[in-house]
Image: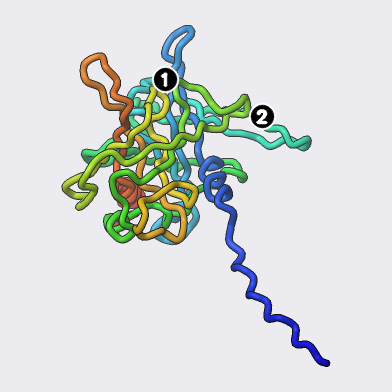
Amino acid sequence: MIQTPPVQDAPPPVTAPVWDLTVGLIDATVQLDQPSGPATRTVGTGFLIQAPRPDGTPRIVLVTAAHVLETMPDPEARIGWRVALPDGAWRFDPEPLIIRDDAGRPLWTRHGDKDVAVMEITAPETFTRAAIPLGWLADENAFDAWQVGPGDELLSLGFPRGLSSNRAGFPILRVGRIASYPLSPVSAFPTFLLDFTVFPGNSGGPVFWTPSARKRPGTTEPETAFIAGLLSQEVRVGDDALEIGVVTHAVFIRETIALLDAETTPAP
């Protein structure tokens, strides 16, 4: 008797592991610092974006909170590159980053009224490859399209009080829940609250969603990771820290990059 072999279910589609999305953002996040005294320093967080110039040529842009750079008075800061070693280890390898010209003028571009700054930089090849595509920045319609709302989880990367996750200088990954409503329109609500503890050094870090973060049941699941915004500050009432962070929507990062484009495009 001839037996018909059972029909095999089609194999599931191959997708990138969730951790790849998060690790990609970790690789693109760097520490920014400048000495502020004999044994103290001002620390912030920045991340790299692939933002081609208007003529299409490649460009790497450093994104951070504007106040991070504004509180660094000296012309030279440091950016915390990391170098992979042949034995699998990593080395923290910070290098100088010139943030002001000889006259003391800022070399970064600031958003008109939001706590966002961007600056074109030259990065090592590994960081150039790690820079986040511009398309990963949420636009003004993203939260409505993806039904992002209160209680949804977002992740954040940073260097709280100048600490890193290890001696190699990788950022610390944190998670929090959206703690405010409504979130749109962005023109009316340019920032939103995230329920997690914020420390000096976190400012400027990316706040993002990946499939590893939990959303409310019955809401739309985005198909890929996206940058929701950047961490601007912690919420304080007097001397009390409320363990809540203020996040500036990513659309204002897009707007600040557009301002950079306008500054660097020759007049006709």
Task: Tell me how far mark 1 sits from mark 2, CA to CA.
Answer: 22 Å
Q: Image quadrant of residue 85?
A: top right
Type of the residue with mark 1: Thr
- Which residue position holds label 2? 91
Direction from residue 256 to residue 46 in the image, left or right: right
Residue at position x 35%, y 46% from top?
152
The secondary element bearing badge 1 is classed as strand
Residue 112 at what x, y percent from top left? 23, 41
Point out which mark residue 149 bears. Answer: none
The secondary element bearing badge 2 is classed as strand
Furthest residue in direction top, as rendered: 38
- Given residues 232 and 144, the one toward you in this image is 144
Residue 24 appears in view? yes
Residue 142 at what x, y percent from top left? 32, 57
- Dot 1: within a 10 Å radius of its alpha carbon, few (fewer than 14), some, or many (20 or more) residues? some
Furthest residue in direction front, as rendered: 1
Residue at position x 40%, y 58% from top?
221
- Which residue position holds label 1? 42
- Tell me the quadrant of the picture where the C terminus can be found: bottom left
Q: In the rendered view, tell whether residue 81 sits above or below residue 219.
A: above
